Amino acid sequence: MSLFRLTLRNVLHRQFLSLLTVCAVAITVAFIVLLTLSRESVEQGAKKGYGPFDLVIGAAGSETQLVLNTFYHIGAPTGNIPLAVLDQAKQDKSVDQAFAMTTGDNFKGFPIVGMDSGYFFTRYGDSKLQEGVMYNRTGETIVGAYVAESLGLKVGDTFSGAHGLVQEEAHESAEAEHGENHVAGEHDEEHDEEHAHESFHYTVAGILPELHTPDDRAVFTTVDYAWAVHELAPEDREITAVLVKPASLLGAHDLKQALDGSNGVQAAYTSKAVSDVLNAVDQGSRLLSVLTAICVLLAGIAILLSLIAAVGERTKDVGLLRLLGKSRAYVWLTLTSEGLLVTAAGLIFGLLLGHLGAYLLKDALFAQAGIQIEPYHWTPEHWLIVAGALSIGLLSSLGPAFRMYRMHPLALFKS
């Protein structure tokens, strides 16, 4: 009987214990694979999330909140700033391009973003729309590929937006269900605002191609949409942020120094805010690494216990093999190959399970954070996972195998 057939027979002889060991290895590997793919997706998504706009100007507050809302469409804006800030940025000689942004409304949970159409050509070049044309009049929109697919939107469709974030609306609904009272004036004001949004209709003029950035899950329209919805007078018109592509890093520094902290305005380096977020993610990853190490340890213990049980069951079989002339090396290989076979089976199932988990989570991750996880991607870390799993299987096999290796064949047979 060949070594492989003998090893396979031994594994199948203890089906339940072998299955538990395979499951322990598979779950550990799947967890590590999913963690690896998620971390890489977060890093890649964060790096390409803001394009060439190294500086962003907005209302005073958290720089991280400003950057996340402006480029990743996450959370609420820090507030509004005077429209004159845009003119000041455009007139600065150190600025290559500057675009105003207005936000604060949503359509079925997807943010409605007012943005000058030049933003798309500056960031994405001459990429053509998937279909339709770019907006050029108030009320016309182009929608991200993810939004169009999720909501089934087509060119020519019309819709009305809603104020604020979905989370805020859900919170308000929850308060109403718990019987919280509202001042009559506030209720009338909210009703008027809701009516203003419902009476303002948007038309889908075009659909963006898949950009693989957070812009895939946003609805874009002209900057003046918020002013039109609320019928604001020229002197009351404000914007949410200004996206700045500086001509040089020195120019970005000079503009930041000129605007930061003046009249409730802040200017933030985009890369710094993104780095702060990534550092926070790294700290969370370190905590998960501790959990991963525990899972690896438990998987190694499961393999070890499985082989110790195998040694106890097959002592006489091994003694008989030795008496029939099989070498100590052959006995040693039967046990180490059994550990490697169980580990390899768990490794294969773990890789499949990890990528399946990434596939199932990709839509939820993109919907919440605009980060696309690539479930079919094979990273260099995958090779480390493979090598690490097989090494743990081999190391766990050495103890029981060495014990059988040292025993005399008669002692094995009589035990």
Image: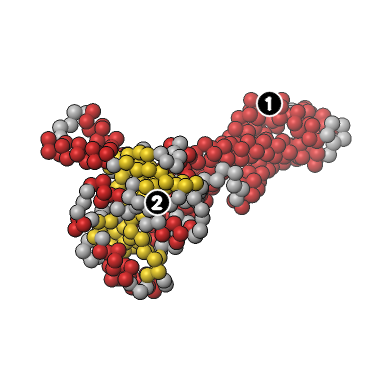
Secondary structure state at the residue bearing disc 2: loop
Question: Is residue 197 at all visible to an observer of this figure?
Answer: yes
Residue drawn 68% across and 26% down?
Answer: 14
Residue 135: which disc?
A: 2
Q: Residues within 10 Å of mark 1 (few under 14, many from 20)?
A: some
Residue in the foreground of this view, choosing between 311 and 111: 111
* Residue 286: percent from left, percent from top: 46, 50
In the rendered image, which quarter is residue 120 located in? Answer: bottom left
Residue drawn 79% across and 32% down?
Answer: 5
Three-letter code, disc 2: Tyr
In the picture, measured across the screen, residue 380 lies left or right of residue 166, that is right
Q: Relative to 403, does residue 233 appear above or below in the rendering?
A: below
Residue 314: which disc?
A: none
Task: Give the residue pinned by disc 1.
Answer: 14
* Residue ranking furthest to the left: 184
In the picture, measured across the screen, residue 156 lies left or right of residue 352, that is left
Residue drawn 67% across and 25% down?
Answer: 15
Quadrant where the image shows the N terminus: top right
* Residue 222: percent from left, percent from top: 34, 52
